[in-house]
């Protein structure tokens, strides 16, 4: 990236909803002088249940919108889109694109001593085996587990809650059995969904002490910061938020993920834009 | 309806996904000689988190597709679309339209002696207050409760499961408190979501014995059967299934809701149709 911009470096962050705001939160900490454009495709979420073709079409149209808004760097905070649409995005765009699956796998490679990694994610991400593939490319062995109840538990606000602890205990008992059956000695757990960082504490209590949790939001922000040369001075610009539906809900629920109030969300009719 | 068709009565059933297959299952029992066209808008589900305008646009485009396929009667099996888009659908279509919210409220009126009704549904349905409004129009008092974890629990297959019983116990304790605070004496519980009939047994175990459960799938089928004059003879035609995405997943998960195998699902590119 060219460090001699006359304006702050503009980074686009894309997710199917507001879960990716956990990634933006980490990015704001790492790169306070950059200008962020966050796009949540809330009219078409969740991507998890949709086909690869549909997800790629949705993600490319959203990414092209961010480029038209001036994004010079794109972070795919959506695990499903990172898993299924990264090649399409790189082919369609002239700017660098980084996805949470590869940043998570990079971090697992850096941290794991045994080379054995556990991954929890949504059903669609697990079915894509994107994390297992990315881990294998880095000579890591991975066991993946779909945890479809965790997103609704987070959205229900049941964070420090007995039901959540029971669900986590069931999921991790199954995952440890899978891991044992595959003769792995895991020392690393990848949180493969942007909602999961909110459950980090109960997750850490539910797994063996020797397993280190890797939060893909944090490691993504660190890798973006290492890849770009953002100006270290200047007045930070407030992030801009775009959503394809329900801006009021985005503001309300999104603030919990971002950890600060969201003042304004611009509603984008992406289908009308696509039809142009 | 005209009983002298040369072809079987053709009934369109619309839902955002495959949950409405519980309604189709009940309809197949009530009207075995009718021909059913089922449309699941799986590319754009769930409708629950979307705005009224978006939901109405999606529902009307799906309904118009079913009319082009020959539907002479339309059942809106999607609670969210019934709650938010029924007027738009009736304005856009020349065929009769019946929605699960009104059929549920009709059944509550027929069955409740106290006139006090409990409703459980998704967050979007509850936020619309469609059931409370429909109940009030029938001189019933209603208390509504959003139960966002029940759909993922059903989709996880955790039907007869301790976590599901614990979640139901929490939800119904809160609902009974709400009901008491409103000074109601409920004798009826409306299942305001097409996924909930699969949880009927644990729900019945979680509520006081004097409260009768009304399954909107069953009562909708009964009210459709009373409204149409389907030929009683002739060879029943197999239902046809249309989905806007992931036909394989529709077949696999949908069979559980329909209670019988789904042989074939036609993939419809609704956005391409809309752009014509």
Image (cartoon, coloured by chain):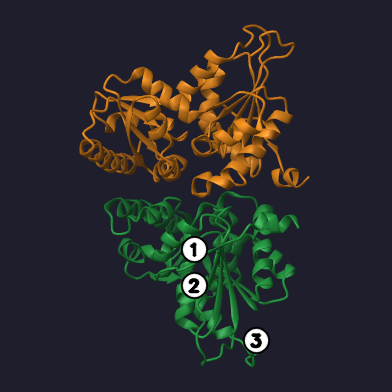
Chain colours: A orange, B green
Question: The N terminus of chain B appears in which quarter of the rendering?
Answer: bottom right
The residue that label 1 is drawn on is B192
Q: Position of residue B262 (x, y in %)?
A: 44, 68
Query: CA separation, marks 3 and 1?
Result: 28 Å
Query: Alpha-carbon distance for marks 2 and 3?
Result: 19 Å
| Crowd tier of the residue under label 2, counting other residues whose Cα lies within 10 Å: few below 14, some 14–19, many 20 or above | many
Name the residue located 54 percent from the left edge and 28 percent from the top edge.
A258
Q: Position of residue B143 (x, y in %)?
A: 49, 60
Instruction: From the top left corner, tell me how far across and down residue A177 is, in percent.
Output: 22, 40
Q: Quadrant of residue A243?
A: top right
> Reading the chain from its start, which is encountered first: label 3 or label 1?
3
N-term mark: 2 or 3? 3
Q: Secondary structure at mark 2?
A: helix
Q: Counting residues from the N terminus, which is met first, the one under dot 2 or under dot 1?
A: 2
Residue drawn at the location 71% of the way across and 64% of the way down: B88
The quadrant the C terminus of chain B occupies is bottom right
Vertical placement of residue A237 versus B138, above or below: above
Q: Which residue is mark 2?
A: B24
Q: Quadrant of residue B75?
A: bottom right
Q: Circle 1 — which element? A: loop
The residue labelled by disc 3 is B1
Mark in the foreground, 2 or 1: 2
Residue sitting at 40 percent across and 34 percent down?
A133
């Amino acid at each position: 990236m060219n460090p001699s911009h006359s304006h702050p470096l503009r980074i686009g962050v894309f997710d199917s909803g507001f879960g990716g705001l956990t990634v933006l939160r980490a990015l704001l900490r790492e790169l306070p002088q950059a200008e962020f454009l966050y796009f949540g495709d809330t009219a078409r979420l969740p991507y998890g249940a949709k086909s690869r073709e549909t997800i790629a079409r949705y993600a490319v149209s959203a990414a092209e919108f961010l480029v038209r808004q001036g994004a010079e760097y794109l972070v795919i905070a959506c695990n499903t889109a990172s898993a299924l649409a990264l090649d399409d995005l790189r082919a369609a765009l002239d700017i660098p694109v980084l996805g949470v699956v590869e940043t998570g796998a990079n971090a697992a490679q850096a941290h794991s001593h045994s080379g054995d990694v556990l991954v929890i994610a949504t059903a669609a991400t697990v079915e894509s085996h994107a994390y297992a593939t990315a881990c294998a490319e880095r000579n890591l062995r991975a066991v993946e587990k779909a945890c479809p109840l965790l997103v609704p538990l987070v959205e229900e606000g049941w964070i420090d809650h007995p039901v959540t602890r029971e669900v986590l205990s069931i999921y991790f008992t199954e995952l440890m059995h899978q891991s044992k059956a595959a003769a792995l000695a895991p020392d690393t757990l990848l949180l493969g969904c942007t909602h999961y960082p909110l459950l980090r504490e109960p997750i850490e209590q539910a797994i063996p002490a020797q397993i280190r949790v890797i939060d893909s939001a944090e490691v993504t922000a660190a890798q973006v910061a290492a890849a770009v040369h953002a100006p270290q001075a200047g007045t930070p610009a407030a992030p801009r938020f775009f959503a394809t539906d329900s801006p009021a809900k985005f503001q309300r629920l999104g603030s919990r993920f971002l950890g600060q109030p969201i003042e304004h969300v611009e509603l984008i009719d992406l289908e009308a834009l696509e039809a142009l």
